[in-house]
Structure formats: structure tokens, C-alpha cells
Image (spheres, rainbow, N blue to C red):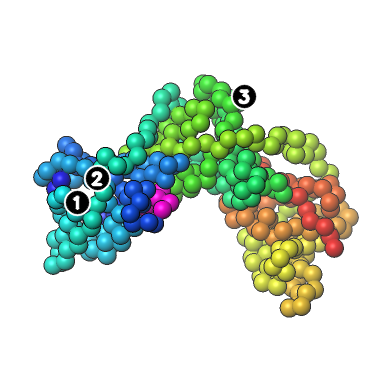
Amino acid sequence: MKFTCDRNILLKEIAIANEIIASKNAISILSNIYLEALDDALIIKATDMKVNFETKVPVDVKETGAITVYGDKFFGILNSIPDGEVEFDQQEAKITIKASVKKARWQLKSIASDKFPEFTASGSEFFEIPVKDFKEMIQETVFAVSDDETRYFMNGVFFEKTDDKFIMVATDGRRLAYISKEAQGIKDFQGIIIPPKILNIVMKRAGDEGMIGISVTDKTIFVQFGSYKLSSVLIEGQFPNYRRVIPEKQNFIFTVNRLEMLDALKRVSLLVEQKSHRVYLGVASGVVSVYCEENEIGNAREEIPCKYDGEEVSIALNYRYIEEPFKVMDSEEISIHFTEPNKAITITPVPEKDFFHIIMPMQLD
């Protein structure tokens, strides 16, 4: 196998492939990236046996062939080479890499391509959704996924199509993130639980224009955009009935400037007790106080204006749980709906859109 290509084009794709790889063991085939030069294109594949990646880039093929190379070092070499053409020449069990603008070359040992796991990166019966909508759905939910492996059914984002809507939900048992998008003319499918890894790759690598293709089977999701083909094994198990925790009615509401609240949380959190992450919101007419309790280091308090006309109330929250949704929302103002200090609060943008966040308060003392 022998080919030349533009370093920047190849580096971008190898960076994605290297994100997929889970193993950093040089002798493991799962640490390797599959390369196949064919018809003036280079096919690139990577897998961790759960998430699969495939793409194709234009190259000048001198000799066709296929090989696998150690992804971590291959990426490091490409990253160190200046912009320009790069030549790759594979002979037997080694691949030689030469930079056109520097008198430098590297030789990497390789593993035969027939050792690379076979996988299907393309499904059937794809439906399409605007990539901008799909990325917004991921952004508004993926941060709320649980990292508790004993509750594995919460370790992913729930995705379903029902009643002419796509719905995404994530929860860790103490908070819930929900978003829906219109889905006219697309066949309903039962809810699936998608691991965050493939969703984070879509977030980082997909643009904001055009459509993204999705295919769902009993155990796998397939995603296609641009030249990329991704697939992931789904998480098995029963996702919690999220509809049961969505409050039907909440009696009180206060509205704050999103950036002012974020800044106040950032400053007060400097002295928050790091085990509990507890902050308090003291809500009174026209003002909300963001403060933490006295601890061995000290305490902090900041007041910011709000729109509220009701009795004074204090709510205790994990500051990360309120900070994270405020970060991903882009509205100037945010409303917080509540009934009692010990019952769930709902965070919505102003004006209300197609998403919301629910947080369970902590004990006040």
C-alpha cells in the first residue's frame, strides 16, 4: 500500500478514530486504526467493539492495500508534522511515514488488516432529522446521564419517536433533562438507550447544516452525516418512566437573568462544601440570594435581581445540577418553577421552548 495525502485532511479523521479507541495497548488490534487505500480514497475504520466508526478521505493512491496501525502513535506523528503533503508506504509489517516539508520519517509496526474486527457501520431504513435539531437534543440532555454503573439503564440517553415527536430524556435519579422535536411522517419506534460516547462524537464532529441519518434496530443505532458512518451498541434495560416525575402544576415561579445566575453560582461555589455541593437560593420579592452554609473555610453570599412576587422561600440544591442546564441554555432569561422547598423544581427558558430540566432539591439543613 502506498499513497500521499494532505496532512490536515487526514489528521482530522484520525483524531476522530483515535477518540473511538478504548485500548492503549500497542499489541492489541483494538488499539489500531484500519486503513485501506482504494480508488483514490482512503477508508478509515476504528472500533472499541461497542462503537464503530468509518469514513473516507481523498488521497493519491500509488498502490492499493490495507493495514492497521497503532492509533495513539499514528495520531501523534501526524499531529507533529507541519502542514503539507505526507507520504505513506507500507511494506510487509511496517508503514513508513514521510513529511514533504521536513527531512523526517517514521516507521510504525503494523498488524495485518484481516485481524481487524468486522463490523457493520451502516444500517437500513434510515430516517432523517436536521442535524442542528439533533445536536440541540444531545446538548440539552447528555450532561444529565448517570455515571452509576449499578444503575446501567441510566448510563445513556433515552430516545423515542411518538406522537409526531422525537423525544430525548436523561436522568441520574436526582435530575431530569427533557427535549422534544417535531417528527412528521416518520414511523414510531420504541424507546432506546443510547450510550453518551457516540452522541458526544456527533456533537463535536457534525456541522450545523443539513440532515443526519439515523437507523434503529433492537440492539444498535446507526448514524450517518457527511462522509461519516457511526454505529453503537445500545444499552439494554428499562429506562425509568420519566413522565411520572414531570410536575403537572407548580404554584410559584421566579425569573432571573441566565448569565447573572451563572456568575453568582460560580463565585459562591468557591466556598461550597465539596462533598455535598449544596447551595441555597433564598427567593424574595424582586431578589434571589445565592449562598452557601458556613463551613470550616467560610461562607459566601450574592444577591441578584429576579422577577418574583410571593412569600420568601429557601431552596437547597446541588449547585452543579442548576449550573449545568444554565450553561447549555441560550435564553437571556430563565424561569424556575416550584411549589414547596422539598419538591421538584422545573427550569425553563423564557419564552418557553421544547425543553425543560427538573431537579430534586436537597435537605435544607
Q: Residue furthest bottom?
A: 297
Cα distance, mark 2 to mark 1? Answer: 7 Å
Going from the N terminus, do you reach mark 1 or mark 3 first? 1
**Residue 224 occupies quadrant:** top left
Instruction: Tell me whether circle 2 and circle 1 mark residues in contact (CB < 8 Å).
Output: yes
**Residue 308 x/y as whole percent:** 80, 54
**Residue 109 occupies quadrant:** bottom left
Q: Give the residue at mark 2.
A: 112
**Residue 53 occupies quadrant:** top left
Instruction: Tell me whether circle 3 and circle 2 mark residues in contact (CB < 8 Å).
Output: no
**Residue 157 x/y as whole percent:** 58, 41
Q: Which residue lies furthest to the right in this view?
A: 311
Cα distance, mark 3 to mark 2? Answer: 49 Å
Going from the N terminus, do you reach mark 2 or mark 1 first? 1
> Mark 2: which amino acid?
Ala
Q: Can see residue 68?
A: yes
Going from the N terminus, do you reach mark 3 or mark 2 first? 2
Is 274 placed above or below 238 here? below
